[in-house]
Image (cartoon, helix red, strand yellow):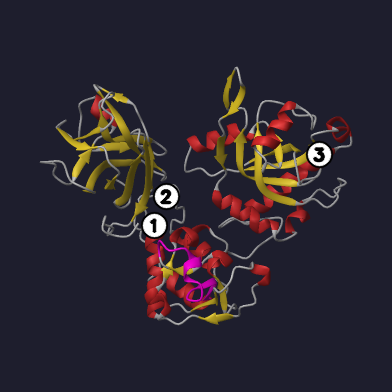
């Protein structure tokens, strides 16, 4: 976490705290004879930390961490965008202040270091980070506010929020304010589905759907197993029938028991199940928005606490993960006469070195190149340059880059695969899906790579972990 002070731009007052949802690098752009044209540079904070901040905002507990020796008023907590640049903005009439209002109108505060901090987090995925700023002054009257001790109060309030977020994260312990362990309460008849989610994460299910580790402990598998537990009657579910969208405070629908038969038709959206607040988790169908199913589905889901605990200790226990995280990049790195269209990056996120690692492409969408045999063993960029092949080592914390598709620099619409003997297999440049299998961790793991492209042949790759039984015929 990056904790400190910032200047208020709008809506906030001195002493308030802002947890940034995103940070605008407002100085990115192009300047010509017609003036400065912004090219927004935006970095987001970790979604899980944003959601935790929103949960902290709902209760006044964090204010109990404020230093009683400081003259705090009634600080508020905001979860909103902020802007970052190299200028100290000290007037509402300053050119930068006017520029921020015109181009970054939803930013509630301005500071200097947050964008660089999030860039460092981005380069060290899967590390999560967020920016927390106490408002120490407005765009005017900075000197007077500083003289009145506003920086100390703002920094203290930002620290209070940070410690409250840390204390309420999955599995955290707080010496200052002891909390119950993140396991379903024996005495509670039913618990929110988000509490079961926390417990599932604690026992080994990977709920990170943005930069996950591969292996059959992925969230897609968890979601399917949970649905099956509902169908089989292992876990009883309750929920509010989704009829209207007037907001949680106005939702008067009762919490009712959901029939087992409901889950034969409807399931869970894995992303919502991993990230949303409990009120915004729905039953439904993948690919259909909840609004299209009003009257037929449920929200604000709860489960039987004892049954959930028994399920997690039995058939709901996760298999071991591979301790390998996967990412993709649209790389143009040159290797001999070719450049990589995109590359898969594998990282050892475990506690020990991995030997005998291997990456294979096991399935490919569309028309397969002639004579291309599956599985196709893929080599690291170092193996390709060294004319080597076979298994490779992945030290603890180490990353390896595996180029997936190649092209000639001046022939962007012609792609190629290479096998481990450097044989070339041509294919047309089209949106392409492939399943790659990674060996070397505690268990093999699969990832689905999707390479999209625009009319100018610019590629937009993405990747997600999928279970070992996944095929390209499954719904994404």
Residue 185's x, y, as percent?
Answer: 58, 73
Residue 202 appears anywhere in the view: no
Counting residues from the start of the chain, the first of labels 3 and 2 encountered is 3
What number of labels is visible?
3
Disc 3/disc 2 C-alpha distance (Å)? 39 Å
Q: Is residue 466 above or below residue 328?
A: below
Residue 465 image offset from top left, x and y in percent: 36, 51
In whole angstroms, how far apart are the C-alphas of marks 2 and 1?
Answer: 8 Å
N-terminal of the pair, mark 1 or mark 3, is: 3
Q: Is residue 190 visible?
A: yes
Local packing at callout 1 (Cα closer than 10 Å; few below 14, some 14-19, many 20+) is: many
Left or right: residue 252 versus residue 470 is: right
Name the residue furthest front.
34
User: Which residue is tagged 1?
Assistant: 218
Distance of label 1 from label 3 (alpha carbons): 44 Å
- What residue would you read off at disc 3? 152
Q: Which residues are magenta?
A: 286-304
| Residue found 38% across the figure and 50% down from its top | 464
In the rendered structure, are the residues bearing label 1 and label 3 in contact, judged by CB atoms less than 8 Å apart?
no
Front one among 424 and 121: 424
Q: Which residue is mark 2?
A: 212
- Asked whether residue 274 is drawn in magenta, I would say no
Q: Which image quadrant for residue 319?
A: bottom left
State the SS at label 3: helix
Q: Is residue 288 left or right of residue 356?
A: right
Q: Position of residue 221 (x, y in %)?
A: 37, 62
Element under disc 1: loop
Q: Residues within 10 Å of mark 3 (few under 14, many from 20)?
A: many
Q: Please say if the residues under marks 2 and 1 sit with CB atoms less than 8 Å apart.
A: yes
Q: Residue 174 in the image: x percent, y percent?
A: 66, 56
Near-viewer residue (240 or 420): 240
Above or below, 442 against 343 in this view is below
């Amino acid at each position: 976490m990056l904790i400190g002070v910032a200047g208020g731009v709008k809506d906030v007052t001195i002493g308030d705290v802002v947890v940034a949802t995103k940070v605008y690098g407002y100085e990115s752009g192009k300047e010509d004879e017609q003036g400065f044209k912004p090219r927004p540079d935006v970095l987001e904070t970790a979604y899980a930390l944003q959601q935790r901040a929103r949960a902290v905002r709902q209760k006044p507990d964090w204010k109990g961490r404020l230093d009683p020796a400081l003259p705090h008023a009634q600080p508020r907590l905001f979860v909103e965008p902020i802007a970052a640049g190299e200028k100290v903005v000290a007037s509402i009439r300053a050119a930068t202040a006017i520029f921020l209002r015109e181009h970054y109108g939803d930013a509630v505060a301005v500071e200097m270091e947050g964008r660089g901090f999030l860039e460092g987090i981005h380069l060290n995925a899967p590390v999560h980070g967020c920016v927390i700023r106490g408002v120490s002054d407005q765009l005017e009257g900075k000197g007077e506010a500083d003289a009145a001790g506003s920086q100390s109060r703002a920094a203290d309030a930002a620290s209070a929020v940070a410690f409250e977020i840390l204390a309420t994260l999955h599995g955290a312990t707080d010496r200052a304010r002891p909390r119950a362990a993140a396991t379903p309460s024996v005495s509670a008849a039913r618990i929110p589905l988000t509490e079961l989610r926390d417990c599932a994460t604690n026992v080994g299910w990977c709920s990170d759907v943005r930069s996950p580790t591969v292996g059959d402990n992925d969230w897609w598998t968890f979601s399917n197993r949970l649905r099956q537990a509902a169908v089989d009657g292992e876990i009883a579910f309750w929920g509010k029938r989704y009829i209207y969208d007037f907001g949680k405070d106005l939702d008067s629908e009762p919490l009712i028991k959901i029939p087992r038969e409901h889950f034969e038709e409807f399931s869970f959206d894995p992303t919502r199940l991993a990230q949303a607040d409990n009120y915004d988790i729905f039953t439904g169908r993948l690919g259909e928005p909840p609004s299209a199913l009003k009257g037929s589905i449920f929200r604000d889901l709860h489960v039987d606490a004892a049954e959930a605990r028994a399920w997690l200790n039995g058939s709901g226990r996760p298999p071991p993960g591979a301790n390998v995280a996967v990412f993709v990049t649209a790389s143009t790195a040159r290797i001999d006469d070719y450049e990589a269209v995109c590359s898969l990056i594998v990282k050892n996120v475990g506690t020990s070195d991995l030997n005998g690692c291997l990456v294979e492409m096991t399935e490919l969408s569309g028309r397969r190149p002639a004579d291309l045999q599956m599985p196709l063993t893929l080599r690291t960029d170092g193996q390709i340059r060294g004319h080597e092949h076979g298994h490779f080592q992945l030290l603890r914390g180490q990353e390896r880059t595996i180029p997936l598709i190649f092209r000639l620099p001046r022939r962007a619409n012609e792609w190629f695969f290479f096998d481990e003997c450097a044989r070339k297999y041509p294919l047309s440049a089209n949106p392409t899906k492939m399943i790659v299998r990674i060996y070397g961790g505690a268990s093999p793991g699969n990832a689905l790579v999707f390479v999209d492209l625009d009319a100018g042949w610019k590629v937009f790759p993405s990747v997600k972990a999928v279970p070992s039984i996944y095929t390209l015929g499954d719904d994404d």
